[in-house]
Amino acid sequence: MTTRKVLLSAFASFMLFIVLLSVFGHSGVLVNRSLAAKLDELSRQEQERRLEIEALEERRGQVSSEAYFDDVALSLGYEREGDLVFYFEDPDVLEVTSSVQAPSDEEPVEVWEGVDSWILALVAAGFWILLLVVMFLVQTFRHGPRGEGDAGRTESGRRGLDEFDWS
């Protein structure tokens, strides 16, 4: 019976090791979740870069047209012959757009590497040792001290309780 309990506790600690390894290990659930979050962040960054490239290609197409040069020249104060020029008190402000983005306030997602297998094995072994100690203590306290017999102990215990004044 005791061997069966030891084997059962060893099996329980092995199952605990398997569960710990599948959750906290190098290929566990937590590592996979952190990798998925990192993949989402990298996909978002890739999409932003693609949009930036498209905007730059569109701007390059605009720069090569003559209408763009005319717009820039007019914004700088040049005029064509025959144009009627109006002067205002407040000068127009030319907005300069930058293709370089400011760094985002979001912190980059870090990938969690997981816990080494030997640490998880130590936790499972500690669980197994704890189960053995608990089984030993339960076995010891269930049967009581080994020096007394069962019949004498119950008789004296019953007589002691019967003689006690409960009032």
Image (cartoon, rainbow, N blue to C red):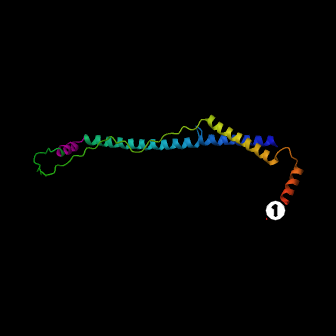
Residue at 83% over, 58% down: 161
Q: Residue furthest bottom?
A: 167
Between 65 and 91, the one nearer to me in the picture? 91
Q: Is residue 119 above or below residue 165?
A: above
Q: Residues within 10 Å of mark 1 (few under 14, many from 20)?
A: few
Which element is circle 1 on?
Answer: loop
Q: What residue did someone put label 1 on? A: 165
Q: Residue furthest right?
A: 151
Q: Amino acid at mark 1?
A: Asp
User: In the rendered structure, does residue 75 fall within the stretch colored magenta?
Assistant: no
> How far from the left and from the top, in percent, is residue 156?
87, 53
Examine the image and state in which quarter residue 58 appears: top left
Examine the image and state in which quarter residue 17 appears: top right
Residue at 54% over, 44% down: 33
Tell me if 93 is positioned left or right of 36 in this view: left
Between 151 and 38, the one nearer to me in the picture? 151
> How far from the left and from the top, in percent, is residue 16?
67, 42
User: In the rendered structure, does residue 66 fall within the stretch colored magenta?
Assistant: yes
Between 132 and 148, the one nearer to me in the picture? 148
> How far from the left and from the top, in percent, is residue 46?
42, 41
How many numbered tags mark residues here?
Answer: 1
Residue at 37% over, 44% down: 51
Q: Is residue 150 above or below residue 113?
A: below
Quadrant (top left/top right/bottom left/bottom right) for the N terminus: top right
Q: Which residues are magenta?
A: 64-74
Q: Is residue 85 above or below residue 25?
A: below
> How far from the left and from the top, in percent, is residue 76?
17, 44
Tell me if 62 is positioned left or right of 76 in this view: right
Residue at 76% over, 40% down: 7
Magenta: main secondary structure: helix
Quadrant (top left/top right/bottom left/bottom right) for the C terminus: bottom right
